[in-house]
Image (spheres, coloured by chain):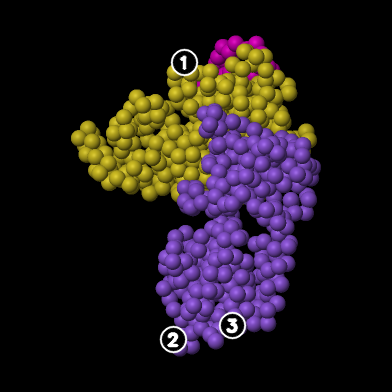
Amino acid sequence: MKTVSIIGAGPAGIEAAYVLAKQGVAVSLFEKSSSPLKNIADKAFLFPNFAAATDIVEQMNRKLLNANITQHLDTDIVGLVHEGEQGWKLTDNRGNSYYSDNVVLATGYTPFDAHRKEELGYGIYNGVVTSLEMEKMIRYNQIVNSMGEKPKRVVFLQCVGSRDEKSGNHYCSKVCCVTAVKQAIEIKKQLPDAEAYIFYMDLRMWGQHFEEMYRQSQQDYGVRYVRGRISEASGTFDGRVQIKAEDTLMGLPLKMTTDLLVLMVGMEASEGTRCLAKAAGICGEYGFAQSTDPHLGDNLTGQQGLYVCGACKRPMSINDVVNDGRAAAFAILEG
Amino acid sequence: MEKRFWNEYQKEIADDHFFYERSCIRQTFFPGSEAAFLRILRNELGKDICDNPHQHTCTGIGYHSDVVPFETTMTVVARLFSLMTECGYENYVPSCVTSFGVFSEVIEKWENNPKLLEQARQYLWEATKREFNIPKNIVHPSDVIYKFRFDLKPKMKYQLVNRFTGKPLRVVEHIGCHYAKIFPERGIGKAEFPYVLAGMIEAWGGEVIDYPERRHCCGFGFRQYLVQENRGYSIANTKKKFQSMEPYEPDFILTNCPGCNMFLDKWQYTIAEMEHKTYDKEGYGIPVLTYEELAGLLLGYDPWKLGFQLHQVQSEPLFNKIGIAYNPDEKYKGISGRLLPRPARPECLRQD
């Protein structure tokens, strides 16, 4: 049986490894961090069923116990080249080389760096946080404003670093809309007296139960939605955040003060994705890896033995990437 | 301000040999500022700067009011550049922020549309038989003072410190829209957190106030004040800024734009007359300074020669806080040495 190297121990990489290992394939799983599932580790609950992220992480970690999977943690793969009969050669940042017949690129995404939208005050005002930081606050039941107090108002802003000319990312990051709805509901569950506002361009409730969550957030939790983008955030005298926006349904400018402004940061190709997609000659748009065909060859690359799966191709939700990891495994098995 | 990323954005500023272009209106409202800039560059920094007497308007106000077409503006700008070229300079320094924006815009259009550049050269030649080079470096004078702020500091007699409390003076800085909002990369600190004035304030001992309406318009928006019926919008903008900065108790306001200076200063009188309201505790109003006035003041220049007596909000309380030496008897002395008539005192804005 041929050997497989999988780069990236996120949900896509783990699922691919698990499926292959169950079929008796020897899998080497490389992860640059010291533990797998780094991007899920601090999440609280996952949409659409509010499953505890810890349960998902636990179940996925259990899959790694398969004897056919060899984990290489703290191993940053920086080189990827096909060397004829020897197959694919992977090189890590310490200069070690690894050979295998097949490679699955599952290097995932990196969250958009909100500092780049400096008009929104991230890194400048303590009351401005990202959706990842809010997720941690929810998870550890520590939703507090910059003074360490329970917030009376929380404002979410969609499409930070997505669908955005200024940051150069014209694509939709797909998961931010529903994540904001989910987080707003969680805030209302933990702090029923707090107000929650979501500023949006349009709400893309594409998945099963998403529309219902959106409706539920309004009917059962009183989350308020404003169609408009926030143009500017400033610090106020009392440590809160003042925002300016245009309510495009009302056709009026709007100014509001909030305790917390949550920036729903989008997904960008991770450094590993950019580097290895370039090395392997499969660069797509925006630094993501490119498959041969989005319909019938979405795990193939046009290069023998090289496969792609998960958010290294484009923004995806967790359930998407798990399915895509599985699909990549079957593509390898089909040969 | 929790953290500061704004000073990471810098730009190229020439080191010497500047061609200076004066503003249409600054000498009326802040008559000592441009002279102070030339004095600072020549006498304090030993720089070469040309003050050509044949210069003229850049058409900025007319252009932004849709009175002057772009082709005319472009040709007028070309003539100014021809003066610079004839004098043998390459580094252009327009005194006014609107001029800086106009020049930046014209050059940008020329770079992106060479036909327009050809047209400008043709128009200028037909009208004046002149030719011109595009400046190699075009910056605002506030950029130049910013660049040399640490060279000036050891020469300064005073610092931005309250001599009674020993604490840094708290300063609101306001940047003209056309400095960085049109071309963010051409402003130090870019458009959201311009650092050009903040850098001076911090270098000279003061503390910058970051208040919610920091980026809001000063009220000088051309269409707001040129049309009399729209002036309510102008004063409403200015008032919004004052209300926002009031809780921070600023010691003074520093600007780099003629219009911002004028409106932030003079609308304080109007608001005081209309609403009996000033935005400082003592009722004097908040002094509004140009960066040249501030640099000159700290270098020990006579405040009356810098033109402080022509401000609407008088600055003696600020002088006293810093410890600036001044002679009240010479405040209204003309160049001939004769005392000029004292202006009428406002009813609601306090003056000593």
Front residue of A204/A208: it is A208
State the residue in front, B183 or A84: A84
- Write the start and end of the magenta stretch as one range: B329-352
Asked whether the viewer can see residue B297, the reply is: no
Q: Is residue A311 visible?
A: yes
Q: Sequence-wise, which precedes: disc 2 or disc 3?
A: 3
Q: Is residue A162 above or below residue A293?
A: above
- Label 2: which residue? A84
Give the image quarter of residue B125.
top left
Look at mark 1 in the image and give the residue it sits on: B228
- Colour yellow, chain: B
Q: Secondary structure at mark 1?
A: helix
Q: Estimate how packed mark 3 is, as few (under 14), some (14 to 19) or many (20 or more) residues with alpha carbons within 10 Å.
A: some
Quarter of the image that includes the C terminus of chain B = top right
**The chain coloured purple carries which letter?**
A
* Residue A121, disc: none
- Residue position marked by numbered label 3 in the rendering: A25
Q: Label 3: state its secondary structure.
A: loop
Which residue occupies the extreme bottom position in the image? A85
Foreground mark, 1 or 3, reads: 3
How many marks can you see?
A: 3
Front residue of this view, candidates B15 and A74:
A74
- Name the residue at 31% across, 38% down: B78
Q: Amino acid at mark 3?
A: Val
- Quick check: B127 left or right of A155? left
* Camera-nearest label, 2 or 3: 3
